[in-house]
Amino acid sequence: MNEHCTINDKWTYNGMKVIFMENEFLKIGILADRGSDIFQYLYKPVGIDLMLRLDKEMINPREVFSQMRDTPNQFEDYYYGGWQEILPNSPAMNYRGASLGQHGEISFIPWNYAIVNQSKELVSVKLWTRPLRFPILIEKTLTLKRGSAQLQIDERLTNESDTYLHLMWGHHIAFGLPFLADGARIKTSATKFLAEPAMPDHRLFKPGKKQDWPMVQSMKDQLVDASKITKAENGQFSELAYLSDFEQRAFYAITTDVMTFSIHWDAAIFKSLWFWQERYATQDAPWWGKTYAIALEPWSSQWRPNPDRKTMDEEWLKLQPREVLETSLVTNCE
């Protein structure tokens, strides 16, 4: 076990640059050449990688192509799990002449990077990129300190155009097995819960009505404790819901029998916490009946199909010409 901090950018995977950051408690793997994904989040004291990993490769989008390149859902073609940064949209759409696929561009393209701190006490790496179809610059710096189980993520988003821009910003954080095999409990500063109406019939929660978290109505009109993640083999369903109305600085914590993962963020920017569950229920594409995934994702707004200008004005982030937006997220394990 490392007794101090290290950072290593000597590795590649399927032709993609990989960066590893490490201290006594954490080993963080970053795919710099594909979206700056955090593909590994290993908590050393219990030897568990928290991130979801589906039974598919971490494919290099520059080398492996789907038969039809113009589909709106290429995010699902390449999705393997992990933690993606999402900009500038979630629903596939045309924004002022720009055709944008599901979950935007930046999780597929290479990011530039620079190691900015490299000592036994502290390591940090800065990553940045610009999508092809949207005039923004996204920069972030990840930092680990000796003796701390926290990962600090400082972000800066710049509108590089001379016009306003609407956008959705999200952190697509998905957890899997073995981390959640025996179930877990969610604690959060959110107070409200809304189940997404567009989910399939094999769902758990009654949609369309904002309810008090965590006791919410099921499809059978029973009150269910939505904060409880049952064991992986208990129950098959698919679900997406939005948690909101945070009482203080936004946070959630997932606690199992052996550890707790938590994350704090600014609720003024990431106003909606998406709670996605796929528990072996979807027998068709893209999950084929073999996927167990639990995701808790800070987003700037909830998902809506075909958003119009009014929706974007009311719910999306809006950056004025050359405006800069800065924020931070902090994770912790114990």
Image (cartoon, helix red, strand yellow):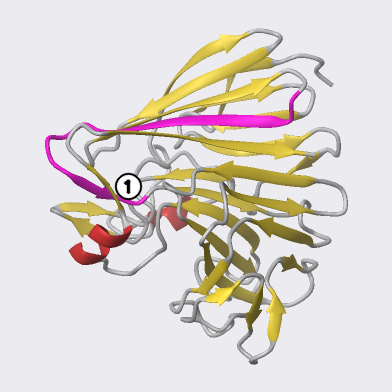
Locate the N terminus and report the quarter of the image it occupies.
top right
- The foreground one among 177 and 207 is 207
- The foreground one among 305 and 108 is 305
Locate the C terminus and report the quarter of the image it occupies.
top right
The percent coordinates of residue 213 (x first, y second) are: 62, 70
Q: How many discs appear?
A: 1
In the displayed structure, would residue 61 be above or below residue 217? Answer: above
Q: Can residue 56 be seen in the rendering of this structure?
A: no
Tell me which corner region of the image, top left, top right, bottom left or bottom right, holds residue 243.
bottom right
User: Label 1's element?
Assistant: loop
The percent coordinates of residue 111 (x first, y second) are: 41, 28
The percent coordinates of residue 229 (x first, y second) are: 74, 66
Is residue 112 inside the magenta stretch?
A: no
Judged left or right of residue 180, residue 154 is left
Farthest residue in the front direction?
Answer: 247
Of helix, strand and loop, which mostly describes the magenta segment? strand
Specify the amino acid type for callout 1: Pro
What residue is disc 1 on? Answer: 88
The percent coordinates of residue 280 (x first, y second) are: 66, 71
Q: Can residue 155 be seen in the rendering of this structure?
A: yes
- The foreground one among 6 and 140 is 140
Q: Residue at the spot x=14%, y=54% of the render?
A: 96
In the displayed structure, would residue 254 be above or below residue 59? Answer: below
Q: Residue at the spot x=76%, y=14% of the render?
A: 4
For the record, the magenta segment spans 148-168
